Amino acid sequence: MSSKHRLRSSARRAVNIGVEGLESRALLSVAPLSGRPFAPFHSAAEIGGSHGGAARHRVKNHIHHDLGGRLQGPAASLGVTVRPMAGHGAQPQATPASAPYTPGQIRHAYGFDQLGLDGSGQTIAIVDAYDDPTIASDLHVFDQAFGLPDPEFVKYVPTSGTPQYNAGWAGEIALDVEWAHAIAPGAQIVLIEARSSSLTDLLSAVDFATSLGANQISMSWGGPAFSRMSNYDYHFNHPGVTYLAAAGDSGAGAEFPSASPYVTSVGGTSLQLDTDGNRLSETAWSSGGGGTTSFEAKPSYQVGFLGGRKRGTPDVAYNADPGTGFLVYDSSSGGAWWQVGGTSAGVPQLAGLVALANEGRALAGNSSLGTGLTYGTNQVLYAMAGGSGYSNPDGDYFDVTSGSNGYSATTGYDLATGLGSPVANRLVPSLINA
């Protein structure tokens, strides 16, 4: 592979309100495979406060509001004003709630609030690169703001010494940790900080997460598929452990590691809610990743869903449009509250969904999701959609049928939003009983 090969991140492209310099982190020039850097996939906008740095500039979209104290309802009810970002998302006829969205809104929109599960007894491992020195205190602020319990939180560095600080990755860490906890507030959260963003270091961190016994592992990073990527599939081939990765934030195209058939690939949508947190519309996000790769054969679970002979991504989708993004607290580089989008935003939240399902499975005396199956959890997800073709018999997915990332969202499986977005109050019980 050329040393000029460029890798994208699935996390924070600067669609920002006071964030600058992040675009350069989202598309990195790299060295050969063993040392090439991956980056996170997200987009961020600062909400209040300044964000220093000579290379940074302040965008016109901004919010002047102190978000201290408890945030319970929609951001609009707190006196927070967010102007829509141009070019992101369809505008529904009904009056939408203002983004950024809170945990309460998202839990209601996707049906998590109807489950009566919180992830107790489960561990969510989050693999990112570099160090976020303020993540523990930032998580506490986030929890206090939204009335969430402080979780059992552990940070590991699998190599000697503390990794250096990187603002873009610190923002990704804050997003991943806070929103995994928002969906599964009773689960233990384990953060594994890779020494660098090289593929070697990140995969070593994934192996370390697996060795800890976590049943759900979040990977909000990636880069374009490459010819030898199937050689690395063994890192994710542990039935009973669910690996999730972002599909990318650059439109049509397959990314690694999400294109591994053993990884659940998470694509992007634009989610519009009403003021009660109900879904008004959900469409394919124009920048969400998705496509086929010539470097992986089509796995058996995609037969009947996808034409051709190659692996297609994404498998599922979740809100990712920065214009309909999430509230994140990150004080590591002088900011505070941020509005964040990108396909990486869905990865830790879907890891939370899997933790809820595995909690329910444990209570029912069942083994963790995907145990004993060649392709693990992905086989179960496609089985819930109909098995040999898309029928969605139990309504486990919201079938996204409009919008495009270069591929059009259509009825059934598509390369823009996969099987669709989760209807958690239906999908989780199905996964428990699978």
Image (cartoon, grey):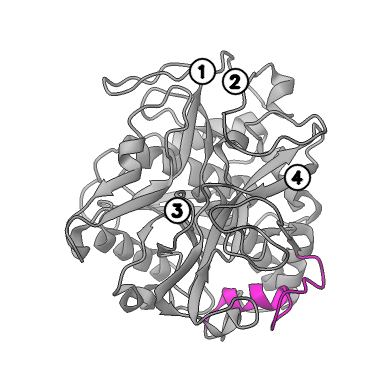
List the residue tagged with mark 2. 67
Tell me the distance, in whole angstroms, between the alpha carbons under discs 4 and 2: 27 Å
Q: Amino acid at mark 3?
A: Ser
User: Which numbered disc flags the more N-terminal residue, 2 or 1?
Assistant: 1
Q: How crowded is the residue under tag 4: few (<14 C-alpha within 10 Å), some, or many (20+)?
A: many
User: Which numbered disc flags the more N-terminal residue, 4 or 2?
Assistant: 2
User: As displayed, is residue 399 above or below residue 260?
Assistant: above
Left or right side of 198 for 85 = right
Q: Quadrant of the C terminus?
A: bottom right
Q: Find out whether the residues at labels 1 and 3 contact each other: C-beta distance under 8 Å.
A: no
Tell me the distance, in whole angstroms, between the alpha carbons under discs 4 and 1: 29 Å
Q: Quadrant of the N terminus?
A: bottom left
In magenta, the rendered stretch is: 375-396
Q: Residue at x 62, y 31 (%)?
A: 100
Q: Find out whether the residues at labels 2 and 1 contact each other: C-beta distance under 8 Å.
A: yes
User: Which numbered disc flags the more N-terminal residue, 2 or 3?
Assistant: 2
Residue 220's tag is 3
Q: Find out whether the residues at labels 4 and 2 contact each other: C-beta distance under 8 Å.
A: no
x, y (%) of residue 383? 69, 78
x, y (%) of residue 353? 64, 59
Q: Is residue 335 magenta?
A: no
User: Which numbered disc flags the more N-terminal residue, 1 or 3?
Assistant: 1
Q: Find out whether the residues at labels 2 and 3 contact each other: C-beta distance under 8 Å.
A: no
Q: Amino acid at mark 2?
A: Leu
Q: Amino acid at mark 4?
A: Ser
User: Which numbered disc flags the more N-terminal residue, 4 or 1?
Assistant: 1
Residue 281's tag is 4
Residue 48's tag is 1
